[in-house]
Amino acid sequence: MEESTSTIKVTTPPDRGAKAEWSSDQKAFKGVPWGKAMMWIFLVSDTFVFSIFLISYMTVRFSTKIDWPNTSEVFSLHVGHTSVPLLLIAIMTFILITSSGTMALAVKYGYEKNRKVSAILMLITAILGASFVGMQAFEWTKLIMEGVRPWENPFGAPQFGSIFFMVTGFHGTHVTIGVIFLFIMARKTWRGDFDKGRRGFFTSQKSNYEAIEIMGLYWHFVDLVWVFIFAFFYLW
Amino acid sequence: MSEGTTQHPLKIYFQVWTLLFVFSAFSYMVDWYQFQGYLRWSLILFFMMVKAGLICSIFMHMWWERLAIKLAILLPCFAILVFVYIMWHESYYTLIIRRLYFLVTGS
């Protein structure tokens, strides 16, 4: 099973430069599987959705007369008698990065057709993702108990609640969808669907190991979005 | 990087993974040590950009893609910066109007 030194032969047409490929007939992205190109285009559109959320956050935060709540205090946790700022958020960040690493390795082992290792790595990724969502649910519960609502909160500017629920809620939804698909992909990989050319339950299409890379693109994107949310919403 | 053979050595994934951990720890330390003002904001932005760059280029394999698809994905994102610029000014305008209004009405 140890084949980490094997090379994967991928036949790609010669690169004639971006200008020639963009202006060519039939295909602009030569050598790129259509599923991957479609996932990238979806991710670009999703980038716009999350940017609009973060831009609206910037707009309400800059235009409010009332002070924005101090996130360092709002998201602190008590360990014993000391209050540790942003503890849960830091743990969530590290969990998501860990899951991104396991996913990257799953893609690598997938291309080496090492299906069992790839499936186990995807399963670990899914479990880490599920624990992330669990912690987010805990965070939401804690804040709701403290009286944070989309229209008011006891810490400062009332817009804080609506931005918090919208941005983290939308991100959490993405993570949840990712976890569901990771479980499905792990099962398909473990069963050897990509080796046997078994048709998908929903699409009735044959698939191959590129599907793991496409799954990986989505998962890394979820991590990427969290990097921006962590920086702008929690740390700023 | 596309000479017909694509091989991503295991080492690079572990290197990037470690770097992501280190930079996340750094950005958490920005809050831990309570840096304020421009130092805080520039450090947050710097660590954010480094992490985003590493995830996008190595984990999402953007580094190994062809220029045609790189441009198709990365160029539209610059439109976001234009929107940020517009709304930045819009928000300050709103704030000034609010301050003025509350000053006149006294609330």
Image (cartoon, coloured by chain):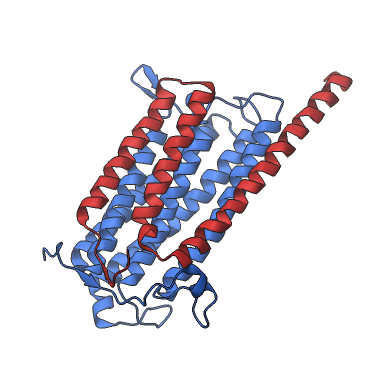
Give the residue at the far right of this rendering: B104
Pick the residue in front: B10 or A233. Answer: B10
Q: Tell me the quarter of the picture where residue B30 sits.
A: top left
* Drawn side of residue B26 relative to residue A55, left or right: left
Of all chains in the rendering, the one displayed in red is B
**Closest to the observer, A30 or B25:** A30
Q: Position of residue A64 (x, y in %)?
A: 70, 30
Residue sitting farthest toward the left: A2
* Residue A141 appears anywhere in the view: no
- How many numbered callouts? 0
Residue depicted at 53% across the width and 36% down the height: A233
Q: Position of residue B57 (x, y in %)?
A: 38, 54
Residue at 26 percent across and 51 percent down: it is: B13
Q: Colour of chain A?
A: blue
Q: Is residue B73 above or below residue A75?
A: below
Q: Is residue A20 visible?
A: yes
Q: Quadrant of residue A3?
A: bottom left
Q: Is residue A18 left or right of residue B60?
A: right
Residue at 30 percent across and 41 percent down: it is B19
Residue A60 in the image: x percent, y percent? 67, 36
Q: As displayed, is residue B11 above or below residue B2?
A: above
Residue at 36 percent of width and 60 percent of height = A216
In front: A128, or A234? A234
Q: Nearer the viewer, residue A226 or A138?
A: A226
Q: Quadrant of the N terminus of chain A?
A: bottom left
Residue A185 in the image: state x and y as whole percent: 33, 67
| Picture quadrant of residue B99 | top right
